[in-house]
Image (cartoon, rainbow, N blue to C red):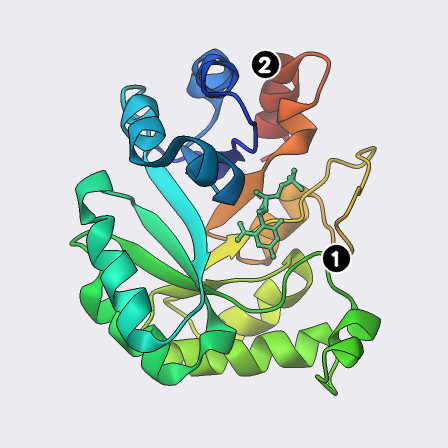
Amino acid sequence: MNSNPVYLALDLPRLDAAEALARKVAGHIGGIKLGLEFFCAHGHHGVHELHKLGLPIFLDLKLHDIPNTVAGAMQAIHVLEPSIVTIHAAGGRAMMEDAKAAAGENCKVVAVTVLTSLDGGDLNAIGVDAEPHEQALRLAELAHSAGLDGIVCSGHEVGAVHQQWKDGYFVVPGLRPDDGRSGDQKRIMTPRAARDAGASVLVIGRPISRAEDPLAAAIAIEATL
Ligand SMILES: O=C(O)c1cc(=O)[nH]c(=O)n1[C@@H]1O[C@H](COP(=O)(O)O)[C@@H](O)[C@H]1O
C-alpha cells in the first residue's frame, strides 16, 4: 500500500460508476473499500474488476455468524486477495479466532466494535448498558485477545484503544471534513484528527463520492493529512 491512509468507500449501486470514481481519484487514495452494497450487487466479479486499478482492496463484509460459517466465508474470499476484511466483534471470541485462522495470507482481519452510526441511546435500546466509548474498548480488548489484527472504531475511541494495543491496526470510518454533513453517522471526526489520534486507515465515502467534484474533494482531504 502507498502511504496514503485513505480507503475510499465505494458504496455505489452501479459497477461502471464505482469504477469510474475509483479511477478518477486513484492517485489520491491508498486503497478501495468495497462493502455490502457493492458486494451484494456485484460479488466476486465486481471485486476482480476493481482489482484492475492496482490498489489494495478492503472487503468490508462485516461477517457475524457462528464460527464455522464465518470461517467458511473467509475461505471463500481467499481468491479475492483482500488486504483487509471486517467481522463483527459481537460475534464473540470463538468466531473471531476461527475467522483469523481461516483468513488468507497477507489479509488483516479487523473487528467492528460499535458502529459509528450508533450513540449511547442506540446501545441502550439493544440492551447494552454502556456508552460507545466503554463498549468499544471492551470489544477491542476481546478482539486483541482473540488474535485479530485490529478493530474498526470511531475517531473518538481510537486514541484510548491505541494506548492499550500499541501495534494494533485501527480502521476509522465516520469521517467528515469540517464542513461535512454527518448524514446517518453519529460519532464523527475530521480525517486529520482521527489520524492524529492513531488511526491506521481512514475510511471515507460520501465526502468524496457525493461531492460535486470528487477529485477536488479527495485532493482537499489529502492536503489536510
Ligand atoms: O466497517 C466499516 O467500514 C464501517 C464501520 C462503522 O462503524 N461505520 C461505518 O460507516 N463503516 C463504513 O464506512 C463507510 C462510511 O461511509 P461515509 O459515511 O459515506 O463516509 C461506509 O461504507 C460504512 O459501511
In which quarter of the view is residue 48 placed? top left
Q: Give residue 183's position: percent from left, percent from top.
A: 80, 42
Amino acid type, residue under disc 2 in the picture: Leu
Is residue 164 depicted above or below 2 in this figure?
below
Of residues 113 and 170, the one nearer the viewer is 113
Q: On the picture, is 214 further left or further right than 21? A: right
CA gap, disc 2 and disc 1: 25 Å
Image height of 19 relative to 165, above or below: above
Which mark, by number, is residue 113?
none
Q: Which residue type carries mark 1? A: Arg
* Cβ atoms under marks 2 and 1 closer than 8 Å: no
Q: Is residue 206 left or right of residue 89?
A: right
Q: Is residue 13 left or right of residue 73?
A: right
* Residue at image coords 29%, 26%: 51
Q: Is residue 116 above or below residue 91?
A: above
User: In the rendered view of the protein, which quadrant contains the N terminus?
Assistant: top left
Determine the residue positioned at 32% across, 35% down. 56
Q: Is residue 59 left or right of residue 199?
A: left
Residue at figure coordinates x 67%, y 44% from the top left: 175
Precedes in sequence: disc 2 or disc 1:
1
From this viewpoint, is residue 98 visible? yes
Tag of residue 215: 2
- Marker count (numbered): 2
Q: Position of residue 15 (x, y in %)?
A: 45, 20
The quadrant in which residue 67 appears is bottom left
- Residue 27 pos. (x, y %): 43, 18
Is ligand 1 less than 8 Å from the beta carbon at label 1? no
Report whether the residue tagged 2 is closer than 8 Å to ligand 1.
no
Q: Residues within 10 Å of mark 1 (few under 14, many from 20)?
A: many
The residue that mark 1 highlights is: 187
